[in-house]
Image (cartoon, rainbow, N blue to C red):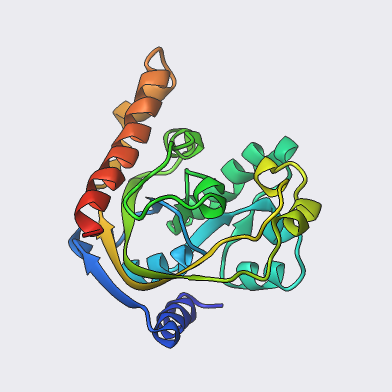
Amino acid sequence: MSSESKLLISRCFLAGLGTQMFVHRPDRIPQESPVLVVSNHRSFLDPVVLTAALGRSIRFACHHYMGQVPVVRELVTSFGAFPLEAPEHRQQHFFSQATALLQNREMVGVFPEGAEPMVNLTGQNTVGKFQRGFAHLALRAPVRDLAVLPVAIGSMQEQSVRSAIPLKLLSLFDPSEPLFDRAGWHPVIVYKRVNILVGRPYWITVDRQQQYRGKKAKAVVAELTDHCQGEIAELLQRGCL
């Protein structure tokens, strides 16, 4: 599927749901460079609204089970997402897939909070702890002019729809995920009015890459992770009013 088709489908899908989207600071979106998009995550709509808002096709890393469930697998892969492998191969697969896409100067999207806020719904202006895998990817990948772009999805009005997916069913496809090993249904949030707030890009310079390979590696990973988490948290405070 072409980039133009993905963008058109995203915008048409949101229009069909009656979702109103407001994009703030689109001037911060790099147009020519490869971009690693880092965002908070509460709804299945997040990849759709980010694609529609940023105006470029985004290749999202998605949960392992999405690559195991028929129909879901075909849907997400046709849209350009790449489901993560089982835990024993997950990190290596994520790094290799994402690096190849970034080297092709594409936009790659990640949700560092993982599945937690999707299953245990958090408040509209709350952001959970970020896993640091994306920071290691950005600093390790042999990619020139890479921008890490924090983007906050700030829900102003939303609707909780009854899900037809029991969590126990998902555990059959991904028994390694403890969040699925419980009774109940997977929450489904549909945005009715949503702000997309673009943060300040964090550029991966040669100096930062050299620091990552030296004694300051841990500090530079923490700096990048904290920049993205802090930027999104601050934007959410302003975008969920």
**Can the viewer see residue 27?**
yes
> Considering the image in quadrants, where does the C terminus appear?
bottom left
Q: Residue at x 60, y 45 (%)?
A: 94
* Image spot of residue 8 (x, y percent): 43, 83
Position of residue 210 in the picture relative to residue 178 (left or right):
left
Residue 19: which quarter of the image? bottom left
* Image spot of residue 240 (x, y percent): 26, 58
Q: Nearer the viewer, residue 148 or 193?
A: 193
> Considering the image in quadrants, where does the N terminus appear?
bottom right
Q: Nearer the viewer, residue 125 or 86?
A: 125
As drawn, which residue projects farthest toward the top?
A: 215
Q: Residue at x 42, y 80 (%)?
A: 14
Position of residue 102 in the picture relative to residue 184 (left or right):
left
* Image spot of residue 101 (x, y percent): 52, 54
Residue 28: which quarter of the image? bottom left
Position of residue 55 in the picture relative to residue 104 (left or right):
left
Q: Residue at x 27, y 65 (%)?
A: 195
Q: Residue at x 44, y 83 (%)?
A: 17
* Image spot of residue 53 (x, y percent): 33, 69
Residue 153: which quarter of the image? bottom left
As drawn, which residue projects farthest toward the front?
A: 183
Q: Nearer the viewer, residue 233 or 216?
A: 233
**Can the viewer see residue 29?**
no
| Number of numbered tags placed on the structure image | 0
Position of residue 58 in the picture relative to residue 168 (left or right):
left
